[in-house]
């Protein structure tokens, strides 16, 4: 029997995201940092932009009983801070072969591949997308990546694509409206504690 994307989504317990081009629009900014004594810059600081819609989506995912994480090839303080800001359960940077991280997560959490969703945009994401239960491509993904996805988000990376993926899964599970209601219920203390929203405060 051929499973629909909705069938696959109903089994998901963990949703994993690439970062550049998925949780961001793929742009990477480097700003030179001059020496404290006025000498020319000897290092660069990396900046990325993230969508607040995706951050709210992480809260919805957790209210829906899912865990979230990122797997990215680049190594960036920005990613570490954003992931900590959103209290993501899994943060893997410097991953040229992303299935290594997926297998480690499976072992830690006792889940199967069918219970994992992966959201990607480029060919580096294909091994994970081909293996997991639900493969999601963002709207700005490379065409060959979209061709292998079970679901393509209506929005592009950095513009709410992560939220699209989360809402698709929650809708398939039949709990999206319930999660939204819980996220805006002031008597429910959980949403505020899930997304601390301090913008990567180092303290």
Image (cartoon, rainbow, N blue to C red):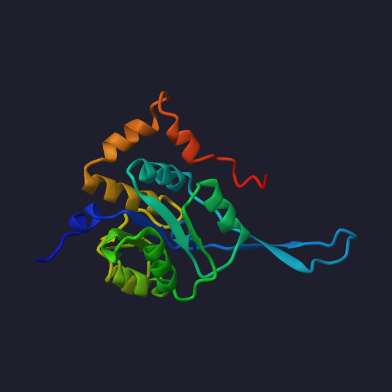
Vertical placement of residue 66 versus 1, above or below: above
Most distant residue in the left direction: 1
The one nearer the camera, 197 or 26, is: 197
- Residue at 41% x, 61% y is 108
Observer able to see residue 137: no
- Count of number-bearing discs: 0
Indicate the position of residue 93 as horizontal and vertical percent values. Answer: 53, 66
The quarter in which the N terminus is drawn is bottom left
Indicate the position of residue 78 as horizontal and vertical percent values. Answer: 60, 56
Decide if residue 6 is on the left or right side of residue 116: left
Vertical placement of residue 114 versus 55, above or below: below
Decide if residue 33 is on the left or right side of residue 67: right
Most distant residue in the right direction: 37
Observer able to see residue 30: yes
- Residue at 68% x, 44% y is 203
Indicate the position of residue 117 as horizontal and vertical percent values. Answer: 32, 60
Indicate the position of residue 63 as horizontal and vertical percent values. Answer: 36, 40
- Residue at 41% x, 23% y is 187
């Amino acid at each position: 029997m051929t499973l629909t994307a909705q069938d696959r989504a109903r089994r998901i317990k963990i949703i994993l995201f690439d970062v550049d081009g998925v949780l961001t629009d793929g742009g990477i900014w480097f700003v030179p940092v001059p020496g404290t004594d006025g000498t020319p810059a000897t290092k660069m600081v990396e900046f990325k932009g993230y969508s607040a819609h995706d951050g709210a989506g992480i809260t919805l995912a957790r209210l829906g009983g899912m865990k979230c994480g990122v797997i990215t090839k680049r190594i960036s303080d920005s990613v570490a801070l954003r992931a900590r800001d959103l209290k993501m359960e899994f943060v893997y940077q410097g991953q040229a072969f992303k299935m290594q991280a997926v297998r480690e997560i499976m072992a830690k959490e006792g889940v199967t591949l069918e219970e994992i969703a992966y959201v990607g945009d480029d060919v580096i994401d294909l091994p994970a997308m081909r293996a997991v239960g639900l493969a999601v491509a963002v709207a700005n993904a490379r065409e060959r990546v979209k061709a292998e996805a079970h679901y393509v988000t209506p929005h592009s990376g950095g513009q709410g694509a992560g939220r699209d993926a989360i809402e698709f899964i929650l809708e398939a599970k039949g709990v999206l409206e319930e999660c939204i209601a819980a996220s805006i219920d002031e008597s429910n203390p959980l949403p505020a504690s899930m997304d601390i929203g301090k913008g990567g405060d180092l303290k």
